[in-house]
Image (cartoon, coloured by chain):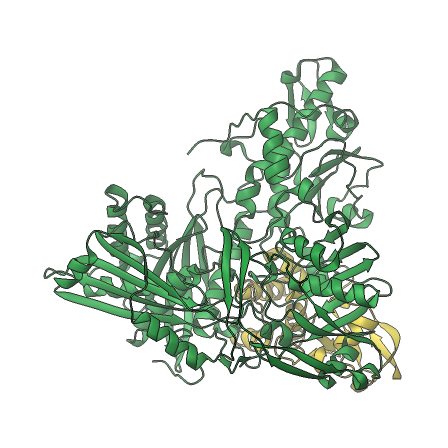
Chain colours: A green, B yellow
Amino acid sequence: MTKINTHIGRRAFIRNTSLASGGLVLGFSFLNSCKPEQAKEMSGTEMPNEWFEMNSYLKIGDNGMVTVYTPNPEFGQNIRTSMPMLVAEELDVDWKNVVVEQAPYHAEKYGFQLTGGSTGIKARWIPLRMAGATAKQMLMAAAAKTWQVPAEEITTKGGVLQHAASEKSAGYGEMASVAATLDVPVEVQLKEVKDFKLIGRSHKNVDAKKIITGEPMFGMDYQKDGMLIAMIVHPPAFGMTLKSVDDEAVKAMPGIKDVITIKSFKEGFKKHGFDTNAFPELVAIVGNSTWEVMQAKKKLNAEWKPITATTEIVNGFFGKETRNTPAGLESTQGHKAQMEALASIPGNIVRKDGNPEAAFKKAAKILERSYSAPFLAHNSMEPINAFAHVEGNKVKIAAPIQIPSFIIPTLESSLGIPKENIEMELPRMGGGFGRKGYAHFVVEAALISQKVNAPIKLVYSREDDMTTGIYRPTYHATYRAAFDENNNLTALHIKAGGIPESPLFANRFPAGAIDNYLAEEWSIDSNITVGAFRAPRSNFMAGAEQAFLDEVAETMNKDAIQFRLDLLKRAKENPVGEDNQYDAQRYAGVLELVQEKSAWKQKDESKHRGVAAYFCHNSYAAHVLDLKMENGKPVVEKVVCAIDCGVVVNPDAATNMAEGAITDGVGNAFFGELTFKDGVPQKNNFHQYQMIRMKEAPKEIDVHFVQNEIDPTGMGEPPFPPVFGAVANALYKATGQRHYSQPFITKKEVVG
Amino acid sequence: MAKFNLKINGQTQEVDVDPTTPMLWVLRDHVKLVGTKYGCGIAQCGACTVHLGNNAVRSCQLPVSAVGEQEITTIEGLSENGNHPVQQAWLEIDVPQCGYCQAGQIMSASALLKRTPNPSDEEIESAMNGNICRCGTYTRIKKAIKTAVNAENV
């Protein structure tokens, strides 16, 4: 695909940037100067005497140094490197002269500052390049004006403006003062993919030095003079709320300043879909130091009472949604029985092609399998935290969160502070995985600060982090395949559901590849709160679907990859239905690439190999995973991975992310599980919740990208879901047993 | 409360804290060295790893009263300017994703190489098994440790 020679009219430019993706407004003066020490060290050059702001994303120093304000919060996907690369590419500057600063939350200047849904690079691909291209064009215009030559005769190279005919040249720094006074150009031209100098070449993490020397950078590291530490005490079970608190003894403990109760929502507040919160009434203990508050937390006497059932209308991503919260204390055992009951009766039909009922009726053979997966906790290494300082009608916040804009209305309402008086810094997150998109803890921190009238840092203990909800839901799916007397696949039936949501994507593969197709779904309400978890719903469906297709291929005596390629060929050449949400050719592309790179066709019988592929977040990923059993334990020897996410901005960083997704997937497939008894989470820390460690991690991971010129699509999530399928299929080869229920490896069960 | 004179990163620091306070919180809240991270508080994740003398220990389980004269080294004191071979290897392999666990990983790895300069894969896995990386950078961590070994052997 060739594209990218983008002429954007001034009107479109302003509309695109200020409404959709952040304003490019000249003469904008918000920008803080960057910290001199850091800038100097990073660039290896002296600090400029003066900065000139070209737009909200970048400023240029009189010595040619460039500061890029990177808009989205960082949680390990390395966008603090790859987003500034987009700006620098089009600005045409040497990377060594670029300093990266984290933009604060500011919707008008930086648009939708979302870290989630694998949308970062995809959403910023054009706007950030425009920011660089616009500034470059203004520098060229400044040179033309200064030298009295036509602007179109000016060229740039590595931060230098040149005019060949008159043999004039000047660094960007020399022209920045004039450029900053010029009008934003009417049109900007973006580079062709073939002309990229930075994009597509690996650049090291700009924060690596700070990370490996332990510099403060995470939300948890935030410090301020006079800052107190706050921790919460929450109900011990889902389905419970605060009844009363006896704080007398705790208030007298050393270092304790106050014990208060807070309510996260004002009566009648219209909640956003991300205002999920199982425990909106909390006790907060505030003190001088974390250890002192932790001791007080253990001693606090509170009484709890059952909640009453509620029905709320929330503003979700797709409009208004009804959210039912039943009363009662739920248990995993009960959940399983409920799910099996609903799985055995008809669900809501979401898609139907052909005549699946008839095909099943006259089938020579039917294969039916059910798959399930438990609730999962995100378990980011950095427990939940937030800094807040309310002073009168203003609040300053520093919070490691994924979607700052979503919590602003809640803050406005709960604090009674207008949104223009809410300032928010976006420190680095020590992992997020979806959990830090639900920023109730920011509201809690701000309410505590408001009540105790001091700057505070709210710190969740690991136990709080693991037991306050927003989990990956528990899911169940039944797949049925019909075969005719010649062993041809004639129909496919999926019935999927979960607590509290269905994981089904009815219009994804293999929809479109099978004449008779039926997809049904169901869901069960719960008071256990759930939220996005790396590739929501896909992270279950991929495993179930790819494990089932493996068994279908086996039933048909077909090679597992060739079987999938045959289905995709059908979907491409003669698709069934019209709403198939995947590109069959790109899907086949990753399977072909992983087939080649894993030497799949060599049929090495000594290897126990599982293959799986999936499409989500606009990208395609396929894995071949080799596994062996050693002393009754599975060892993942090697994973070969192929990804099509369009243009790869920073290949080594993307490779790192794919390696992480694969390791994360293996870990959760093997061990990930949170269970409940009478509303109480049965695990509250890492002695109970098994996380993958180095010994269980894949011994080798080999990542390959499909080379094309398609605009970038998702990268953080797509390689994660298919891992579950590859693990299940390789486990079968290694043990002779199919695995249907996650987690596949538990302490009770010895496989093989 | 009680006063303790601690040797941290080659300097003496006086703190006045409850004697049961774990070194993790002494470092983070009182000495303001926040490179050492809180992850679990029960010695299960390794994010709080520091050196006590030459040994890697979980500072969340080390009460300040148990330290005495022993030298404590944190990530901030591992080298002058991030130039310890393990830190350099971490940069070369570009290990971190979110980065939160990496100080603990580096402290475990540097303690390993001090006592076992040329570890086998099994020795690396055993020494590093107490450090969780939720982002899943284990393959890079292992590679970086081997890179540090080779750099030392040159």
Q: List the single residue furthest toward the left.
A: A485
Residue A522 occupies which quadrant of the picture? Answer: bottom left
Whether residue A674 is visible, yes or no, is: yes
In the rendering, at what x and y percent does residue A119 appear?
53, 48
- A710 and A577: which is toward the camera: A577
Q: Quadrant of the N terminus of chain A?
A: top left
In the rendered image, residue A238, in percent from the top left (x then y), is placed at: 56, 76
Q: Is residue A558 left or right of residue A149?
A: left
Q: Up-down: is A145 above or below B3?
A: above
Residue A345 picture location, percent across and down: 29, 69
* Side of A373 where A283 appears, left or right: right
Q: Quadrant of residue A57?
A: top right
Q: Nearer the viewer, residue A555 or A324?
A: A324
Count of picture labels: 0
Q: Which residue is painted at 33% across and 47% down in the image? A: A580
Q: Position of residue B65 (x, y in %)?
A: 81, 86
Return the residue nearer the eye: A725 or A516.
Answer: A516
Viewer can see residue A89: no
Please state, as top left, top right, bottom left or bottom right, where the C terminus of chain A lies in the image.
bottom left
Which quadrant of the structure image shows residue B31? bottom right
Residue at position x 65%, y 67% in the image: A382
Residue A574 vertical position relative to residue A408 in the rendered view, above or below: above
Q: Is residue A570 left or right of residue A329?
A: left
Name the residue located 49 percent from the left edge and 33 percent from the top edge.
A194
